Amino acid sequence: DERPARIIEACVMGTVQFRSAVIEVAQRLNSEADSSTSSLEGGEIKFQAIVPQAKPLSPGETLGCTAPSGLAQLDFQDALLSPRERRERKKQAAAAAGAANTVPEGSNDSIPRERVMLFLADGRFHLEAAMISNPTLRALRYDPYSKTLTEERYETVKMKRLRREAIMAVRKSLGISDPLQRGGRVTSSVQDGDDIANSVLQPQQQCSLSSRPPSSANRKTMGIILGTLGRQGNPAILSRLRSLLHSRGIQTMIVLLSEIFPKKLEMLSKPTSSGGSGVCAWVQVACPRLSIDWGHYFCVPVLSPFELYVAFGEVENAALWVAEEEKTGEPVDDLTDQYPMDFYTKSGGPWTNYYESNAKRKVLSYGV
Protein backbone atom coordinates (compact mmCIF):
# COMPACT_ATOMS: atom_id res chain seq x y z
CA ASP A 1 0.00 0.00 0.00
CA GLU A 2 1.11 3.55 -0.71
CA ARG A 3 2.23 5.29 2.44
CA PRO A 4 0.39 8.56 3.23
CA ALA A 5 2.37 11.79 3.41
CA ARG A 6 0.64 12.81 6.64
CA ILE A 7 -1.65 11.31 9.29
CA ILE A 8 -4.29 13.36 11.10
CA GLU A 9 -5.10 12.00 14.56
CA ALA A 10 -8.58 13.29 15.40
CA CYS A 11 -10.05 13.35 18.90
CA VAL A 12 -13.77 13.53 18.13
CA MET A 13 -16.05 15.11 20.73
CA GLY A 14 -19.23 17.14 20.89
CA THR A 15 -22.26 18.22 22.84
CA VAL A 16 -24.66 15.58 24.13
CA GLN A 17 -27.30 16.10 21.40
CA PHE A 18 -24.74 15.04 18.80
CA ARG A 19 -23.51 12.03 20.78
CA SER A 20 -24.50 9.48 18.13
CA ALA A 21 -23.02 11.63 15.37
CA VAL A 22 -19.71 11.81 17.27
CA ILE A 23 -19.46 8.02 17.29
CA GLU A 24 -20.45 7.77 13.62
CA VAL A 25 -17.90 10.40 12.54
CA ALA A 26 -15.08 8.54 14.29
CA GLN A 27 -16.16 5.22 12.78
CA ARG A 28 -16.36 6.69 9.26
CA LEU A 29 -12.95 8.33 9.53
CA ASN A 30 -11.40 5.04 10.63
CA SER A 31 -13.22 2.91 8.05
CA GLU A 32 -12.22 5.22 5.22
CA ALA A 33 -8.65 5.31 6.52
CA ASP A 34 -8.50 1.51 6.32
CA SER A 35 -9.55 1.53 2.67
CA SER A 36 -7.89 4.60 1.19
CA THR A 37 -6.26 7.94 1.82
CA SER A 38 -7.53 11.40 0.97
CA SER A 39 -5.70 13.45 -1.63
CA LEU A 40 -5.12 17.02 -0.51
CA GLU A 41 -2.65 19.71 -1.45
CA GLY A 42 0.74 18.62 -0.14
CA GLY A 43 0.19 14.89 -0.56
CA GLU A 44 -1.97 12.02 0.63
CA ILE A 45 -3.59 12.31 4.07
CA LYS A 46 -4.87 9.52 6.25
CA PHE A 47 -7.26 10.06 9.15
CA GLN A 48 -7.36 8.15 12.43
CA ALA A 49 -10.00 8.93 15.04
CA ILE A 50 -10.79 8.18 18.67
CA VAL A 51 -13.64 9.25 20.93
CA PRO A 52 -12.19 10.29 24.33
CA GLN A 53 -14.27 10.07 27.48
CA ALA A 54 -14.39 11.98 30.75
CA LYS A 55 -16.17 9.45 32.94
CA PRO A 56 -18.96 9.26 34.03
CA LEU A 57 -20.01 11.27 30.95
CA SER A 58 -20.74 9.30 27.80
CA PRO A 59 -17.95 8.84 25.22
CA GLY A 60 -17.21 12.11 23.45
CA GLU A 61 -19.58 14.13 25.62
CA THR A 62 -18.29 17.49 26.81
CA LEU A 63 -19.82 20.00 29.19
CA GLY A 64 -18.93 23.64 29.67
CA CYS A 65 -17.06 22.72 32.86
CA THR A 66 -16.04 19.11 32.09
CA ALA A 67 -13.96 17.77 29.22
CA PRO A 68 -11.42 14.99 28.54
CA SER A 69 -7.86 16.09 29.30
CA GLY A 70 -4.35 14.95 28.46
CA LEU A 71 -5.20 14.30 24.81
CA ALA A 72 -1.87 15.67 23.59
CA GLN A 73 0.04 13.11 25.70
CA LEU A 74 -2.27 10.19 24.88
CA ASP A 75 -0.88 7.00 23.30
CA PHE A 76 -3.04 7.37 20.22
CA GLN A 77 -2.19 4.00 18.65
CA ASP A 78 -3.18 2.24 21.85
CA ALA A 79 -6.37 4.29 22.11
CA LEU A 80 -7.37 3.16 18.61
CA LEU A 81 -7.57 -0.45 19.78
CA SER A 82 -10.64 -2.09 21.24
CA PRO A 83 -10.35 -3.53 24.77
CA ARG A 84 -9.93 -7.01 23.29
CA GLU A 85 -7.25 -5.85 20.85
CA ARG A 86 -5.51 -4.02 23.67
CA ARG A 87 -5.37 -7.19 25.76
CA GLU A 88 -3.99 -9.13 22.79
CA ARG A 89 -1.39 -6.46 22.20
CA LYS A 90 -0.26 -6.66 25.83
CA LYS A 91 0.04 -10.44 25.55
CA GLN A 92 2.13 -10.14 22.39
CA ALA A 93 4.32 -7.49 24.01
CA ALA A 94 4.84 -9.70 27.05
CA ALA A 95 5.71 -12.69 24.85
CA ALA A 96 8.20 -10.64 22.87
CA ALA A 97 9.68 -8.92 25.91
CA GLY A 98 12.81 -11.04 25.74
CA ALA A 99 13.44 -10.40 22.06
CA ALA A 100 16.11 -7.85 21.21
CA ASN A 101 15.20 -4.63 19.42
CA THR A 102 11.50 -5.35 19.51
CA VAL A 103 9.51 -2.42 18.18
CA PRO A 104 5.78 -2.19 18.98
CA GLU A 105 3.51 -2.20 15.97
CA GLY A 106 2.72 1.26 14.64
CA SER A 107 5.53 3.00 16.53
CA ASN A 108 8.25 2.74 13.86
CA ASP A 109 7.08 5.08 11.14
CA SER A 110 8.44 8.38 9.95
CA ILE A 111 5.11 9.69 8.73
CA PRO A 112 4.35 13.18 10.10
CA ARG A 113 1.38 13.17 12.47
CA GLU A 114 -0.82 16.00 13.60
CA ARG A 115 -3.26 15.66 16.46
CA VAL A 116 -6.41 17.79 16.49
CA MET A 117 -9.73 18.04 18.28
CA LEU A 118 -12.78 17.69 16.03
CA PHE A 119 -15.81 19.05 17.84
CA LEU A 120 -19.47 18.75 16.78
CA ALA A 121 -21.57 21.61 18.13
CA ASP A 122 -23.63 24.59 17.04
CA GLY A 123 -21.80 26.88 19.49
CA ARG A 124 -18.39 27.06 21.16
CA PHE A 125 -19.17 27.20 24.90
CA HIS A 126 -18.65 23.46 25.43
CA LEU A 127 -15.75 23.40 23.00
CA GLU A 128 -14.00 26.01 25.13
CA ALA A 129 -13.86 23.51 28.00
CA ALA A 130 -12.01 21.08 25.73
CA MET A 131 -9.65 23.84 24.59
CA ILE A 132 -8.93 24.84 28.20
CA SER A 133 -8.21 21.19 29.08
CA ASN A 134 -6.02 20.67 26.00
CA PRO A 135 -4.45 24.06 25.22
CA THR A 136 -1.75 22.74 22.88
CA LEU A 137 -4.11 21.03 20.41
CA ARG A 138 -5.75 22.63 17.39
CA ALA A 139 -9.53 22.79 17.66
CA LEU A 140 -11.84 22.33 14.67
CA ARG A 141 -15.58 22.84 15.12
CA TYR A 142 -18.16 21.41 12.73
CA ASP A 143 -21.63 22.95 12.94
CA PRO A 144 -24.17 20.33 11.75
CA TYR A 145 -26.79 23.02 11.12
CA SER A 146 -24.78 25.45 8.98
CA LYS A 147 -22.53 22.64 7.72
CA THR A 148 -19.42 24.73 8.27
CA LEU A 149 -16.00 23.69 9.58
CA THR A 150 -14.06 26.38 11.43
CA GLU A 151 -10.82 26.52 13.37
CA GLU A 152 -11.42 27.90 16.86
CA ARG A 153 -8.96 29.55 19.23
CA TYR A 154 -9.01 30.32 22.94
CA GLU A 155 -6.88 32.85 24.82
CA THR A 156 -5.66 30.44 27.47
CA VAL A 157 -2.79 32.63 28.63
CA LYS A 158 -5.09 35.64 29.08
CA MET A 159 -7.66 33.55 30.95
CA LYS A 160 -5.05 32.18 33.34
CA ARG A 161 -3.65 35.67 33.91
CA LEU A 162 -7.12 36.98 34.86
CA ARG A 163 -7.77 34.06 37.19
CA ARG A 164 -4.28 34.36 38.69
CA GLU A 165 -4.96 38.04 39.42
CA ALA A 166 -8.25 37.13 41.12
CA ILE A 167 -6.55 34.47 43.23
CA MET A 168 -3.73 36.81 44.22
CA ALA A 169 -6.26 39.53 45.12
CA VAL A 170 -8.00 37.10 47.48
CA ARG A 171 -4.68 36.03 49.01
CA LYS A 172 -3.70 39.67 49.56
CA SER A 173 -7.06 40.50 51.13
CA LEU A 174 -6.77 37.53 53.49
CA GLY A 175 -3.11 38.16 54.32
CA ILE A 176 -1.75 34.95 52.84
CA SER A 177 1.91 35.28 51.86
CA ASP A 178 3.51 31.88 51.26
CA PRO A 179 2.00 30.30 48.09
CA LEU A 180 2.82 26.80 49.28
CA GLN A 181 2.01 27.23 52.95
CA ARG A 182 -0.54 24.73 54.17
CA GLY A 183 -2.76 25.52 57.09
CA GLY A 184 -3.97 22.88 59.49
CA ARG A 185 -5.34 20.19 57.23
CA VAL A 186 -8.84 19.10 58.07
CA THR A 187 -9.99 15.51 58.16
CA SER A 188 -13.40 14.57 56.87
CA SER A 189 -16.12 12.34 58.17
CA VAL A 190 -19.74 12.15 57.10
CA GLN A 191 -22.18 13.71 59.54
CA ASP A 192 -24.99 11.66 61.00
CA GLY A 193 -28.38 12.50 59.58
CA ASP A 194 -29.46 14.09 56.35
CA ASP A 195 -30.49 17.50 57.63
CA ILE A 196 -28.26 19.47 55.26
CA ALA A 197 -29.83 22.84 56.00
CA ASN A 198 -29.22 22.62 59.76
CA SER A 199 -25.69 21.31 59.21
CA VAL A 200 -24.70 24.08 56.83
CA LEU A 201 -26.25 26.85 58.89
CA GLN A 202 -24.96 25.68 62.28
CA PRO A 203 -23.12 28.35 64.34
CA GLN A 204 -19.50 28.81 63.39
CA GLN A 205 -17.05 27.49 65.97
CA GLN A 206 -14.07 29.55 67.07
CA CYS A 207 -10.74 28.68 65.48
CA SER A 208 -7.35 28.73 67.09
CA LEU A 209 -5.13 31.76 66.47
CA SER A 210 -2.57 29.56 64.73
CA SER A 211 -5.03 28.76 61.95
CA ARG A 212 -5.77 32.40 61.16
CA PRO A 213 -4.05 34.32 58.38
CA PRO A 214 -0.94 35.85 59.98
CA SER A 215 -1.73 39.49 59.13
CA SER A 216 -5.45 39.41 60.04
CA ALA A 217 -6.19 41.54 63.07
CA ASN A 218 -9.92 41.33 62.39
CA ARG A 219 -11.52 38.27 60.94
CA LYS A 220 -12.32 38.55 57.24
CA THR A 221 -15.58 37.38 55.70
CA MET A 222 -15.90 35.41 52.47
CA GLY A 223 -19.21 34.66 50.84
CA ILE A 224 -20.13 31.19 49.57
CA ILE A 225 -22.72 31.01 46.82
CA LEU A 226 -24.68 27.77 46.43
CA GLY A 227 -26.27 27.65 43.00
CA THR A 228 -29.91 26.58 43.01
CA LEU A 229 -30.29 26.19 39.25
CA GLY A 230 -30.89 22.49 38.59
CA ARG A 231 -28.26 20.38 40.35
CA GLN A 232 -25.36 22.82 39.94
CA GLY A 233 -25.01 23.51 43.65
CA ASN A 234 -23.61 20.60 45.67
CA PRO A 235 -24.07 21.00 49.47
CA ALA A 236 -21.14 18.64 50.11
CA ILE A 237 -18.74 20.92 48.21
CA LEU A 238 -20.17 23.92 50.05
CA SER A 239 -19.47 22.18 53.35
CA ARG A 240 -15.87 21.45 52.35
CA LEU A 241 -15.27 25.07 51.39
CA ARG A 242 -16.94 26.39 54.51
CA SER A 243 -14.85 24.15 56.75
CA LEU A 244 -11.65 25.07 54.87
CA LEU A 245 -12.35 28.77 55.39
CA HIS A 246 -13.24 28.30 59.04
CA SER A 247 -10.03 26.35 59.62
CA ARG A 248 -8.14 29.46 58.47
CA GLY A 249 -10.09 31.76 60.78
CA ILE A 250 -12.25 33.23 58.02
CA GLN A 251 -15.93 33.91 58.58
CA THR A 252 -18.41 32.85 55.94
CA MET A 253 -21.73 34.08 54.66
CA ILE A 254 -23.80 31.57 52.69
CA VAL A 255 -26.11 32.78 49.92
CA LEU A 256 -28.37 30.68 47.71
CA LEU A 257 -28.81 32.08 44.20
CA SER A 258 -30.26 30.77 40.96
CA GLU A 259 -28.33 33.38 38.97
CA ILE A 260 -25.26 35.42 39.93
CA PHE A 261 -25.41 39.09 38.93
CA PRO A 262 -22.66 41.70 39.51
CA LYS A 263 -25.11 44.22 40.99
CA LYS A 264 -26.47 41.71 43.48
CA LEU A 265 -22.99 40.72 44.69
CA GLU A 266 -21.98 44.38 44.88
CA MET A 267 -24.92 45.03 47.19
CA LEU A 268 -24.08 42.00 49.36
CA SER A 269 -20.38 42.87 49.49
CA LYS A 270 -20.79 46.40 50.85
CA PRO A 271 -19.81 47.16 54.48
CA THR A 272 -22.69 46.89 56.90
CA SER A 273 -24.26 49.86 58.71
CA SER A 274 -23.05 48.41 62.03
CA GLY A 275 -19.44 48.83 60.98
CA GLY A 276 -18.77 45.43 59.45
CA SER A 277 -16.18 45.27 56.68
CA GLY A 278 -18.45 43.40 54.27
CA VAL A 279 -17.53 40.45 52.07
CA CYS A 280 -13.97 40.63 50.71
CA ALA A 281 -14.43 37.84 48.14
CA TRP A 282 -16.80 35.10 47.00
CA VAL A 283 -16.51 31.46 46.04
CA GLN A 284 -19.35 30.02 44.02
CA VAL A 285 -20.53 26.41 43.94
CA ALA A 286 -22.52 26.59 40.73
CA CYS A 287 -20.52 26.48 37.50
CA PRO A 288 -16.74 27.05 37.35
CA ARG A 289 -17.19 28.87 34.04
CA LEU A 290 -19.01 31.67 35.85
CA SER A 291 -15.70 32.56 37.48
CA ILE A 292 -13.56 31.84 34.43
CA ASP A 293 -15.72 33.78 31.95
CA TRP A 294 -17.22 36.53 34.11
CA GLY A 295 -15.27 36.66 37.39
CA HIS A 296 -13.28 39.76 36.41
CA TYR A 297 -16.48 41.78 35.93
CA PHE A 298 -17.47 41.66 39.61
CA CYS A 299 -16.60 44.30 42.22
CA VAL A 300 -14.75 41.70 44.33
CA PRO A 301 -13.11 38.43 43.22
CA VAL A 302 -15.44 35.50 42.57
CA LEU A 303 -13.49 32.24 42.69
CA SER A 304 -14.43 28.72 41.69
CA PRO A 305 -13.94 25.93 44.28
CA PHE A 306 -10.73 24.84 42.53
CA GLU A 307 -9.36 28.37 42.65
CA LEU A 308 -10.05 28.61 46.37
CA TYR A 309 -7.96 25.48 46.93
CA VAL A 310 -5.19 27.07 44.84
CA ALA A 311 -5.42 30.29 46.86
CA PHE A 312 -4.82 28.37 50.10
CA GLY A 313 -2.04 26.21 48.63
CA GLU A 314 -4.15 23.06 49.01
CA VAL A 315 -3.59 21.87 45.43
CA GLU A 316 -0.44 19.78 45.08
CA ASN A 317 0.49 21.15 41.65
CA ALA A 318 -0.45 24.77 42.34
CA ALA A 319 3.20 25.81 41.91
CA LEU A 320 3.19 24.27 38.42
CA TRP A 321 0.06 26.19 37.48
CA VAL A 322 2.02 29.43 37.75
CA ALA A 323 5.77 29.27 37.29
CA GLU A 324 8.17 32.18 37.64
CA GLU A 325 10.84 33.07 35.16
CA GLU A 326 14.16 32.89 37.01
CA LYS A 327 15.63 36.06 35.48
CA THR A 328 12.65 38.42 35.49
CA GLY A 329 10.59 37.00 38.33
CA GLU A 330 7.50 37.52 36.19
CA PRO A 331 4.85 34.78 36.15
CA VAL A 332 4.79 32.72 32.97
CA ASP A 333 2.26 30.17 31.78
CA ASP A 334 3.18 26.60 30.92
CA LEU A 335 0.46 25.35 28.60
CA THR A 336 1.39 21.73 29.34
CA ASP A 337 -0.08 22.22 32.82
CA GLN A 338 -3.81 22.39 32.18
CA TYR A 339 -6.40 24.36 34.07
CA PRO A 340 -8.74 21.50 35.10
CA MET A 341 -12.15 21.13 33.52
CA ASP A 342 -13.24 18.30 35.82
CA PHE A 343 -16.31 19.51 37.73
CA TYR A 344 -18.31 16.38 36.85
CA THR A 345 -15.53 13.80 36.43
CA LYS A 346 -14.72 10.92 38.73
CA SER A 347 -11.01 11.75 38.62
CA GLY A 348 -11.28 15.30 39.98
CA GLY A 349 -10.20 16.77 43.30
CA PRO A 350 -12.24 17.76 46.39
CA TRP A 351 -13.72 20.69 44.45
CA THR A 352 -15.59 18.31 42.09
CA ASN A 353 -18.98 16.61 42.30
CA TYR A 354 -17.81 12.98 42.26
CA TYR A 355 -14.87 13.28 44.66
CA GLU A 356 -15.31 10.71 47.44
CA SER A 357 -18.48 11.56 49.40
CA ASN A 358 -19.30 14.64 47.30
CA ALA A 359 -21.25 12.32 44.99
CA LYS A 360 -23.71 11.65 47.81
CA ARG A 361 -24.31 15.40 48.14
CA LYS A 362 -24.12 15.09 51.92
CA VAL A 363 -22.54 17.56 54.28
CA LEU A 364 -19.24 16.55 55.87
CA SER A 365 -18.03 17.41 59.34
CA TYR A 366 -14.44 18.65 59.54
CA GLY A 367 -14.46 19.53 63.21
CA VAL A 368 -14.40 23.28 62.53
Image (tube, rainbow, N blue to C red):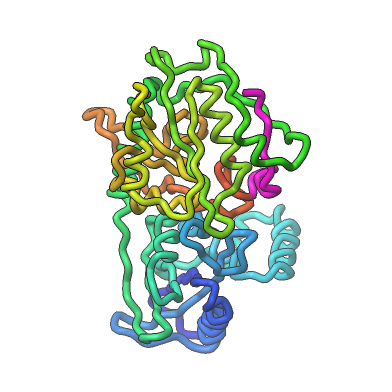
x, y (%) of residue 13?
A: 50, 70
Is 357 magenta? The answer is: yes
Q: Is residue 101 left or right of residue 139?
A: right
Report the quarter where the C terminus lies.
top right
The residue at the point 56 percent across, 65 percent down is 52
285 versus 316 height, above or below: below
- Residue 330 or residue 245, whichever sits in front: 245
Q: Is residue 159 left or right of residue 227?
A: left
x, y (%) of residue 308?
A: 46, 36
x, y (%) of residue 121?
A: 43, 75
x, y (%) of residue 253?
A: 48, 33
Q: Which residues are magenta?
A: 354-368
Q: Is residue 7 left or right of residue 353?
A: left
- Residue 222 or residue 190, whichever sits in front: 222
Q: Which residue, as the protein is rendered here, is positioned at the far front?
A: 273
The residue at the point 49 percent across, 72 percent down is 14
Is 180 magenta? The answer is: no
- Quadrant for residue 235, please give it: top right
